[in-house]
Image (cartoon, helix red, strand yellow):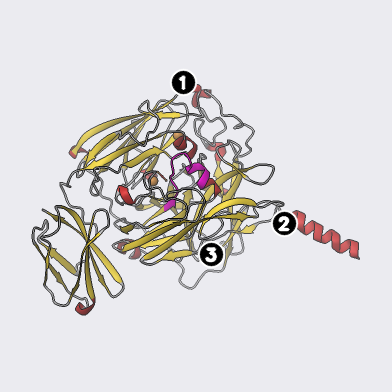
Amino acid sequence: MKYFITTLVLLAIVFSGYSQNPLFIPPILEGNNINLHVQNGSMPFLSGKETATMGVNGSFLGPTVILNQGDSVQLSVFNDLDEPTTMHWHGLHVPAKLDGSPHNVIQPHTIWSPRINVLDQASTFWYHPHLHGKTAEQVTKGVAGMIIVRDNQESALDLPRNYGVDDFPVVIQSRAFDSNNQFVVNTADDHILLINGTIDPILKVPAQIIRLRVLNGSTNRVYNIGFQGNHQFYQIASDGGLLEAPLALTRLMLAPGERAELLVNLSGLKDQNLDMFSFGSELPNGIYGAAVPGSMGMGSIDGYSANILNGKNFKLIRLSVTAQTTQAVTAIPSKLVLIQKPDPSKSSVTRIITLSASGMGMGNLSGPFLINGKSFSMERIDFSAKMGATEIWQITNQTAIAHPFHIHGLQFFVTDIGGSQPDRSRQGRKDVVLVPAMQSVRLIMKFDDFSDPLIPYMFHCHMLSHEDDGMMGQFLVTGIPTELNTMINDPVIRIYPNPVTDRLTVEASGVDRSSVIIEIRNDLGQLCLQEKISEFPATINTSHLKTGIYTISFIYQNRTLVRKVVRF
Ligand code: C2O
Ligand code: CU
Ligand code: CU
């Protein structure tokens, strides 16, 4: 009998290594004060020794930060590590000084506290460190989290948005472990999948339409997302916001850094399982994750062909369908939002940006890679863009492997990939685009806000090992805007004149006057003026403000509305 029980216990232990684990859903962090503690930790990923990790407010990954458009939010990043880091808000439209680039270093045991105004549309963004040369290592160890931005337009649509109930974060990462169960950074042996930090995950989902916010948070790997039995799904958002209408798909390729929001209809599937896959066998060669990483059979990467994920189909998550919830979304909306793209006829500049390999030419798939023939330097500004300008960037890939190209601080639109119109899933707001081997991609963007004469924005390959190796550049946005960008059109508050000189008039209706506080901040987020308003219309003395752009926050009843104003 004793022997029998021992055998059962042993069997249970052996099988637990192969059994499915409930998908970890990171907790939510919201409100006007977001505190993020970057810390060391450890995780029992594999049986035996625990893996040394880094996480945010925990051992691995970080909380999902929820922001509301129009809010003014104090972000505080506590570096509890014994090494420097930075924290980048990937996709957020914020000043370069606040965007967590390699220039915004947070020394060990210090706090970095950018205050940002949330100007973005409803989207799925993410945060991760960006210390030059250390990004891959710190992200691999676990420092990353999701950001969900909400806005009124999205809230008015009948979409699943009950976090952890019908709206789920899905952070996909591939990892390699050494014989001591420790992470290996920058290796082609990344064959163990972590979804939200869970190995072999299973997620209980209701039998209705669910929303998956998928982030490719891997160092190098591209995924080709789909479901078992080619179950159809609908893409509703690309990197920086909702598409114009849901797009019915059976596959969606996601490169490192890219996000997509998907709707999956699980009605009628109660008590069944539906597996989410990456169909790697269908990836064309010339992409990290395909059977051959170089296009036209060129080059190889050490250890690549031994990796069991490459060129193969593999499961990402098992969805286990349970009963419908009471407030189920059961129809796919026919329309989402109107997208306004920059007008190409207004474009003043076409920038040619080349991606090339140093040494060994085309056969070099491991890098280091160069942008415009140069390796990254913190001291070099590659170019400046004028505030208010519309620009076209042509990214020409002269290498045999595809690179996901990312630009900080704004959302762009892809006008063509290799001369043809991008597929519809890439026609929305984007901040990462996969540039295929030996092809060019053109992007259009407008520099609406946030000039800074000193602190640049980054552009780089989002394969983190390429980025750390110097496949990155930086640009300044200079000058005063030619056009104002007021993204928040709340009818309650009116300010004029704008641009303003000495006196600003504020009118408001529908708010309780006794509780309105007005704050004016410069484009670095510094407080320049704070006033309590008791009577509308109110006159505010702005004569002491220097010329430039400011944000005005109206704080009332625990809400903050933000507007922009220019001081002339
Ligand atoms: Cu997600 Cu510059 O990075
Ligand atoms: Cu970024
Ligand atoms: Cu690259």
Left or right? Give the position of 128 relative to 10.
left
How many residues crowd mark 1 within 10 Å: few (<14), some (14–19), many (20+)? Answer: some
- Identify the element where label 2 is drawn: helix
Q: Where does residue 307 sit, x and y in percent of width and height?
A: 62, 36
Query: Of label 1 and label 2, which has the lower sequence position?
Result: 2
Asked whether residue 128 appears in the rendered view, the answer is yes
**What's the residue at 55%, 48% (across, down)?**
141
Q: Is residue 345 magenta?
A: no
Q: What residue occupies the far top of the structure in this picture?
A: 360
Image location (x, y in percent) of residue 20:
66, 56
How would you rate the neighbour count of disc 2 (Cα within 10 Å): few for under 14, some for 14-19, many for 20 or more? Answer: few
Distance, label 1 to label 3, CA atoms, is: 52 Å
- Mark 1 to mark 2 CA distance (whole Å): 47 Å
Which mark lies nearer to you, 2 or 3? Answer: 2
Q: Which residue is mark 1?
A: 361
Q: Which residues are magenta?
A: 126-138
Give the Cα distance between marks 2 and 3: 27 Å
Q: Secondary structure at mark 1?
A: helix
Question: Is 27 situated above or below 247?
Answer: below
Based on the picture, tell me whether residue 135 belongs to the magenta stretch. Answer: yes
Q: Position of residue 6 (x, y in %)?
A: 85, 61
Nearer the observer, 470 or 421: 470
Identify the element where label 3 is drawn.
Answer: loop
Q: Which residue is mark 2?
A: 16
Task: Name the residue beneath numbered marker 3.
Answer: 207
Using the rendered view, name the quadrant where residue 345 is placed: top left
